[in-house]
Image: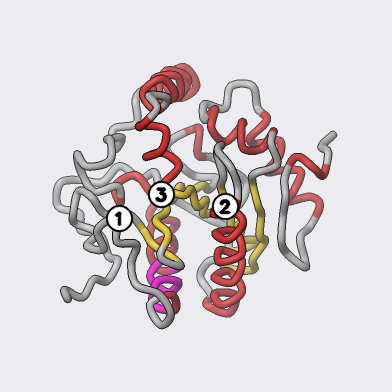
Amino acid sequence: MFSENLIIYTCMNLEEEVFIDYYNFLSNKVFPCVAAKDAMAKGNIKLFVADNIACPKDDKSILDFIYKFTDFYRKSGKGFYSAAIIFNQPEILNEEVFDGLLWQRLAALRRLDELQYPHDSRVEANPEDSNFSFSLMEEAFFIVGLHPTSSRPARRFKYATLVFNPHAQFEAMKKDARYEKMKTIVRKRDVSFSGSVNPMLTDFGEASEVYQYSGKNYDSQWKCPLPFNQP
């Protein structure tokens, strides 16, 4: 059974069933991401349950939630932090469907955010750039998509979910030499859990991180659908 102080959440209509499902997903002994496990144990994860990932009606509430999480993260100390947006609907039939919906929601959130904030200057705004990272409230995020039909076992979760991981926390780890150790552990655990290395996996600066967001294995012809207007 979970303890409520393990995960901090902000949502008026958070259903206990969804809360328990996500807790159990991260608590699985073979789940490879040790950073997520650490964040959960220290109460550094916030959850928001939205209605339909295909519908824009919750976008402003989601953005407000991310802004509050960003304030929380910026005022906190060292450690891992993440915010998960869990969608009740629709049923995800395949990876193609989820991939399209992920980019649809991220594009909508970015359009709203651009009305108030510029892109985080520490990263690039062009999704084709190898130094790109998604940005809201002038804070860069590495996005992890979860859904029940993912080809990667470590990303198979009951609900369509977008996990926002502050990019700066990984850069901070690189400065004190913790990043390489954590990366090695996570990748070994992922191979053990999934049976293979994620073919889309690269380090920041080697290739755009957009290839890693949804968990889909893209071919060489794929172009990120996230709109970008050259300044």
Q: Residue at x 66, y 37 (%)?
A: 40
Amino acid carrying label 2: it is: Tyr
Q: Are marks 3 and 1 in contact (CB under 8 Å)?
A: no
Q: Nearer the viewer, residue 194 or 120?
A: 120
Q: Position of residue 161 (x, y in %)?
A: 55, 53
Predominant SS of the magenta segment: helix
* Residue 12 on the magenta span: no
The magenta segment: 105-111
Is 201 positioned to the left or the right of 182 in the image?
left
Quadrant in which the C terminus is drawn: bottom left
User: Between tags 3 and 1, which lies in front?
Assistant: 1
Disc with the residue nearer the chain's start (2 vs 3): 2
| Residue at which label 3 appears | 142
Is 71 positioned to the left or the right of 140 in the image?
right
Q: Is residue 228 above or below residue 198?
A: below
Crowding at dot 2, Cα within 10 Å, few <14 / some 14-19 / many 20+, comes out as many
Quadrant in which the N terminus is drawn: top right
| Residue at which label 2 appears | 73
Q: Residue at x 30, y 42 (%)?
A: 217
Disc with the residue nearer the chain's start (3 vs 1): 1
**Coloured how?**
secondary structure
User: Between tags 2 and 3, which lies in front?
Assistant: 2
Q: Report the Cα–Cα distance between label 2 and label 1.
A: 17 Å
**Residue 195 visible somewhere in the drawing:** no
Disc with the residue nearer the chain's start (2 vs 1): 2
Crowding at dot 1, Cα within 10 Å, few <14 / some 14-19 / many 20+, comes out as some
Q: Secondary structure at mark 3?
A: strand
The numbered mark at residue 122 is 1
Q: Position of residue 97 (x, y in %)?
A: 42, 58
* Residue 91, quarter of the rendered image: bottom right
Amino acid carrying label 1: it is: Arg
* Residue 21, quarter of the rendered image: top right
